[in-house]
Amino acid sequence: MLKEQRLASNGSEQRGGIVWLTGLSGAGKTTLAEATRELLVHSGTACVVLDGDRLRAGLNRDLGFSAADREENMRRTAEAAALFLEQGFVVLVATISPSAAARAAIRDRFREAAFAEVYVKCPLAVCEDRDPKGLYGRARRGEIRQFTGIDAPYEPPDRPELILDTERISVEDNARALAHSVRSMLAD
């Protein structure tokens, strides 16, 4: 099917895009992606969220947390995002994505698409305080190995298109800023 036909089949002539949210566990990536999706859908933008935890529970459940498995996790996630992009969706990807090199490969994968890397910035101490799944506590006790931010590295983006501070700025304000950024990206 031609791309133009696929775009028309989703009910709009919307151009899709990829928004890759990266940050530590507990930084608020999924919460922010879901809030932004609601704003975009409400304004008529076809949008979907790909959540790292949900992908790891299904599509990527066979992967561990070695460097190679983390890169494969990101590669598969990017391929899933590409399927939605081809249909004209804005894809909000909420995943830790700890490796700068792997994120650069993702950016290169989507070099011909509207793409934005968004750093969901939150200090480790705040993420640990939030710890909605109890993962940091388990990692500190040695029950989880290779946990990003504890005994596995996280490389913050050097030049993301957008930085959203979830320690100081509300979910609502960050979601409005992200939705505005997405609309601008699609208009270019």
Image (spheres, rainbow, N blue to C red):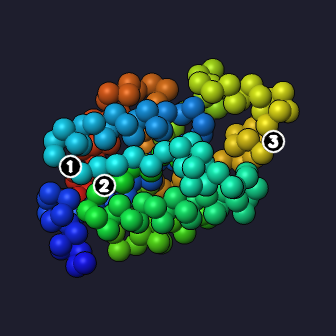
Determine the secondary structure under disc 3.
loop
Q: Which disc, if any, is residue 45?
A: 1
Q: Nearer the viewer, residue 30 or 62?
A: 62
Of the two numbered discs 1 and 3 on the same chain, state the one appearing first in sequence: 1
Q: Which mark is residue 145?
A: 3
Q: Position of residue 112 (x, y in %)?
A: 35, 74
| Quadrant of the image containing the C terminus | bottom left
Count of all numbered marks drawn on residues in the image:
3
CA distance separating discs 2 and 1: 8 Å
Residue 179 x, y percent position in the rendering: 27, 43
The residue indicated by pointer 2 is 90
Mark 2 / mark 3, whichever is N-terminal: 2
2 or 1: tag closer to the N-terminus: 1
Q: Amino acid at mark 1?
A: Thr
Q: Secondary structure at mark 2?
A: strand
* Dot 2 and dot 3 residues touching (CB under 8 Å): no
- The residue that appears at 73% across and 51% down in the rendered structure is 65
Up the image or down, 48 lies above or below 85; here it is above
**In x, y percent, where is residue 185?**
26, 57
Q: Answer above or below: position of 84 versus 153.
A: below
Report the Cα–Cα distance between label 2 and label 3.
34 Å
**Residue at x 22%, y 69% (from the top left corner):** 6
Q: Which residue is at a point 48% across and 56% down the rendered structure image?
A: 159
Give residue 110's quadrant in the image: bottom left
Residue 65 seen in the current view? yes
Quarter of the rendering occupied by the N terminus: bottom left
Residue furthest to the right in view is 142
Residue at 31% of width from left, 29% of height from top?
A: 173
Q: Farthest top residue? A: 129
182 vs 67, left or right, is left
Q: Crowding at label 3, few (<14), some or many (≥20) Cα neighbours within 10 Å?
A: some
